[in-house]
Amino acid sequence: MESVAVIGGGSWATALVKIISENKFSVSWWFRKEADVDHVLKYQHNDRYLSGVTLNLSYVQPSTNLPQVIQQATWVILAVPAAFIESVLANLPPTIFTGKYVVSAIKGMIPVKNCLVTEYMQATFGVLMQQQCVIAGPCHAEEVALEKQSYLSIGSLDLQLAERFCVLLRNRYVRASPLDDIYGIEYCAVMKNIIALACGIAHGLNYGDNFQAVMVSNAMLEIEAFLQAIYPRPRNLSGSAYLGDLLVTAYSQFSRNRTFGNMVGRGYSVKSAQFEMNMIAEGYYAVKIIHELNKKLRVKMPITAAAYNILYERISPPVEIAILKDKFQ
Ligand SMILES: NC(=O)C1=CN([C@@H]2O[C@H](COP(=O)(O)OP(=O)(O)OC[C@H]3O[C@@H](n4cnc5c(N)ncnc54)[C@H](OP(=O)(O)O)[C@@H]3O)[C@@H](O)[C@H]2O)C=CC1
Ligand SMILES: O=C(CO)COP(=O)(O)O
């Protein structure tokens, strides 16, 4: 019988715990605060994220003991925002993931090291790429909570491993399919957050749907050029793990990145927008990382450059988007 550890107590972790435990697989679930564990044990739901989801405690064991949570499982799902993954895993023995399969549910990259989460796990804990999967696809935790039809793509170099993980996820409202472009979907998931953030900024500045449609179609060119520069291979970017994920993030009311961008467009400072949101917008960190990686690659990325100038160079959003609009066709 498969057993699963989920690291992280936010929305996406909660949605994954719901899906996997309802499929009757045992889930050990790591939280950073004892109060959150106590709340789950007492009320059968996560206090601050997707609190309407009732969890079956016969299959869910919440804990703050990270080594124990990992040791109990065959599969370890990482579901903490990328900016915090190093501090969360900091005190673990380097061999703790030996014999485990590691699955990144994270749509972000490790700041400063500027690497993908899968690359970080390989370099730091020796988890081979063949032992890793990533969860991609257009899927908001909030819609999983409402059991709305959703589609996930599981990326791995080993398609049999990806298929084995898909079995843990498939249910009445979740379809999951394996895909071998692990690097491509991991990068695409990072980049779509930047685009959603830029869409939010434009929306906050009162640009309309016409402009956003052109921004999103230009974004596909930007993403394609970057992916071909960093991990070239044939790929169909109109698939749901690429275009689908960009669309849901750019247009959905649930999108953290779009919401964050919208606040910045309306005049909030970065700090106050982050403070207002109870959730993390990965795109904020991704903009800097992709910008830095692109110093070597020198791909033409006008949307990412505009987002970087607004968020990190304090250029005013109306000025930067006005410059960007002249670059679109
Ligand atoms: N939400 C979604 O629909 C989806 C999210 N993802 C990805 O899942 C990952 C997790 O995001 P999501 O679940 O949305 O997160 P949320 O924004 O819902 O929650 C924030 C999470 O970050 C944690 N956190 C905040 N500050 C720190 C810190 N200093 N150190 C450690 N942890 C901290 C919070 O822990 P605490 O509660 O203890 O403060 C909480 O678990 C992201 O990479 C996201 O892109 C992927 C697909 C869908
Ligand atoms: O990646 C996600 C859904 O596929 C979640 O990110 P956002 O909340 O920014 O849309």
Image (tube, rainbow, N blue to C red):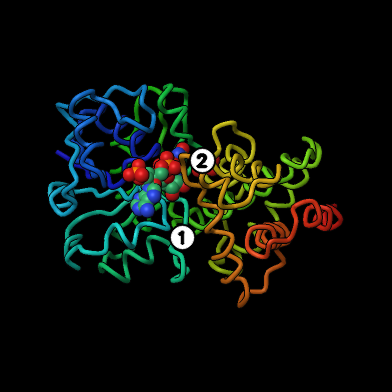
Give the residue type at disc 2.
Met
Residue at 59% from the left image edge and 52% from the top image edge: 270
Asked whether, in this view, residue 280 is left or right of residue 322, the answer is left
Asked whether, in this view, residue 177 is left or right of residue 206, the answer is left
Residue at 79% from the left image edge and 36% from the top image edge: 208
Asked whether, in this view, residue 44 is left or right of residue 129, the answer is left
The quadrant in which residue 18 appears is top left
Q: Secondary structure at mark 2?
A: loop
Query: Which residue is situated farthest in the bottom direction here?
Result: 296
The residue carrying pointer 1 sits among few (fewer than 14), some (14 to 19) or many (20 or more) residues within 10 Å by Cα, namely many
Q: Secondary structure at mark 1?
A: strand
Query: Any mark on residue 40, and which?
Result: none
Give the residue type at disc 1.
Met
Image location of residue 256, percent across then percent down: 54, 41
Asked if residue 17 is positioned above or below residue 111 in the image, the reply reads above
The answer, for residue 19, to whether it is visible in the render is yes
Asked if residue 56 is positioned above or below residue 289 in the image, the reply reads above
The mark closer to the camera, 1 or 2, is 2
Q: Is mark 2 within 8 Å of ligand 1?
A: yes
The residue carrying pointer 2 sits among few (fewer than 14), some (14 to 19) or many (20 or more) residues within 10 Å by Cα, namely few
Image location of residue 82, percent across then percent down: 41, 56
Image location of residue 319, percent across then percent down: 81, 56
* Residue on which disc 1 sits: 109
Along the viewing direction, whichever of 182 and 258 lies nearer the viewer: 258
Residue at 78% from the left image edge and 57% from the top image edge: 320
Query: Any mark on residue 277, and which?
Result: 2
Image location of residue 185, percent across then percent down: 50, 53
